[in-house]
């Protein structure tokens, strides 16, 4: 029986949203559960997230994070994960609203105590914690590695993880890093040699594919050199090699495509901003120039 999803991400804040973006963009069927004791809504305002020189309000930042995750292909579900258990398919997830589903991987991205993982029955996960004079067991933030890997196969923990969840920009980066760890392990499981299992999610200008690097045979030669010794069959090796090259060429963007992406990106961002604030930020000269350009196109 196949699992319902490739990955279930628990937590839809900066950590979980960033993880979901990377996982979905890679092509893994990803669901993000977003309900629980979140840290970001407790902030008054965010002034240290790069790219927002005057800061960004919590509601707009959250809307941007969720919009990005859904645009990348995530299913965003407003529900609280109550338990994660082992199953034949990987994991069985149960929620407060009565949902039941299975997933090959689980990526924990909720900063609270992690009690929903208790049914995995690993004594090393939890440690005594004193809170207001009382001792209770909480998830040990040092249980996962820095990259989010754990002794439980298929379980990755981005939060709580060390001290890497206290600031929104750090939390987002941690979510992305742990997602990349999961993707790397997934690729190794498919047979990619270790040196070629790491996934880099970036788009390249068309100029990067000129000369010898515009030739697939040059990529084949490079792949074979990087792969080194392996125990793959010739057929499987060729299949993985061609997949790798296909993904590389799929990142190529022409100047026209870059211009179109830029326009779409600006427009999508503007959809989340206050209309009056946008108009106030545009000076009269810019508006006149824009109107004149429209008139020129019309006539």
Image (cartoon, grey):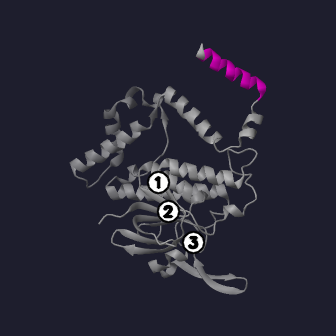
Assess whether mark 1 and mark 2 are in contact (beta carbons under 8 angstroms).
Answer: yes
- Residue sitting nearer the eye, 60 or 237: 60
The answer to if 7 sits in the magenta stretch is no
Label whose residue precedes the other's in the sequence (3 or 2): 2
| Label 2, label 1: how far apart the Cα atoms are | 10 Å
Residue 228: x percent and y percent? 32, 49
User: What residue is shown at x 39% (from left), y 74% (from top)?
Assistant: 86
Residue 50, percent across and down?
A: 68, 47
Query: Which numbered marker is on residue 9?
Result: 2
Residue, disc 3: 142
The correct choice, above or below, for 38 with respect to 48 in the image is below
Question: Mark 1 or mark 3, which is nearer to you?
Answer: 1
Upstream in the sequence, badge 1 or badge 3? 1
Gap in Å between the C-alphas at discs 1 and 3?
A: 23 Å
Few, some or many residues within 10 Å of mark 3 (<14, 14–19, 20+): some
Q: Residue at x 52, y 69 (%)?
A: 144
- Residue 224 visible to an observer of this rendering: no
Q: Which residues are magenta?
A: 283-297
Indicate whether residue 287 is drawn in magenta. Answer: yes
Q: CA distance from mark 3 to mark 2?
A: 19 Å
Q: Earlier in the sequence, mark 2 or mark 1?
A: 2
Q: On the picture, is 187 further left or further right than 203?
A: left
Q: Quadrant of residue 275?
A: top right
Q: Residue at x 76, y 45 (%)?
A: 54
Q: Can you give x and y, in whole percent of width and height, for residue 286 in the image? A: 73, 25
Which image quarter is the C terminus in?
A: top right
Question: Of the numbered discs in the image, which one, if any, rests on residue 41?
Answer: none
Q: Is residue 296 found left or right of 195 in the rendered image?
A: right
Q: Are marks 1 and 3 in contact (CB under 8 Å)?
A: no
Residue under label 1: 23
Which quarter of the rendering shows the N terminus?
bottom left
| 114 over 293 or under it: above or below | below
């Amino acid at each position: 029986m196949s699992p319902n999803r490739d990955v279930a991400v628990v937590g839809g804040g900066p950590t979980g949203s960033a993880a979901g973006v990377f996982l979905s963009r890679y092509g893994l069927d990803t669901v993000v559960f977003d309900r629980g004791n979140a840290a970001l809504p407790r902030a008054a305002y965010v002034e240290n997230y790069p790219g927002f020189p005057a800061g960004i309000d919590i509601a707009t930042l959250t809307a941007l994070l969720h919009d990005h995750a859904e645009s990348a292909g995530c299913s965003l579900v407003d529900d609280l994960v109550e338990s994660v258990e082992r199953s034949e398919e990987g994991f069985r997830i149960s929620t407060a609203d009565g949902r039941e589903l299975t997933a090959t991987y689980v990526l924990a991205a909720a900063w609270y105590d992690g009690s929903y993982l208790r049914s995995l029955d690993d004594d090393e996960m939890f440690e005594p914690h004193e809170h207001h004079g009382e001792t209770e067991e909480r998830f040990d933030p040092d249980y996962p590695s820095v990259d989010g890997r754990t002794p439980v196969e298929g379980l990755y923990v981005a939060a709580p993880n060390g001290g890497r969840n206290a600031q929104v920009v750090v939390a987002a980066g941690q979510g992305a890093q742990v997602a990349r760890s999961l993707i790397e392990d997934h690729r190794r499981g498919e047979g990619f040699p270790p040196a070629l299992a790491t996934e880099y999610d970036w788009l390249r200008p068309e100029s990067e594919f000129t000369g010898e690097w515009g030739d697939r045979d040059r990529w084949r030669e490079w792949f074979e050199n990087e792969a080194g010794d392996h125990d793959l069959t010739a057929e499987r090796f060729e299949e993985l090699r061609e997949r790798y090259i296909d993904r590389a060429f799929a990142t190529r963007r022409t100047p026209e495509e870059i211009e179109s992406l830029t326009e779409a990106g600006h427009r999508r961002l503007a959809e989340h901003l206050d209309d009056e604030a946008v108009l106030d930020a545009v000076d009269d000269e810019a508006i006149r120039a824009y109107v004149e350009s429209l008139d020129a196109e019309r006539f």
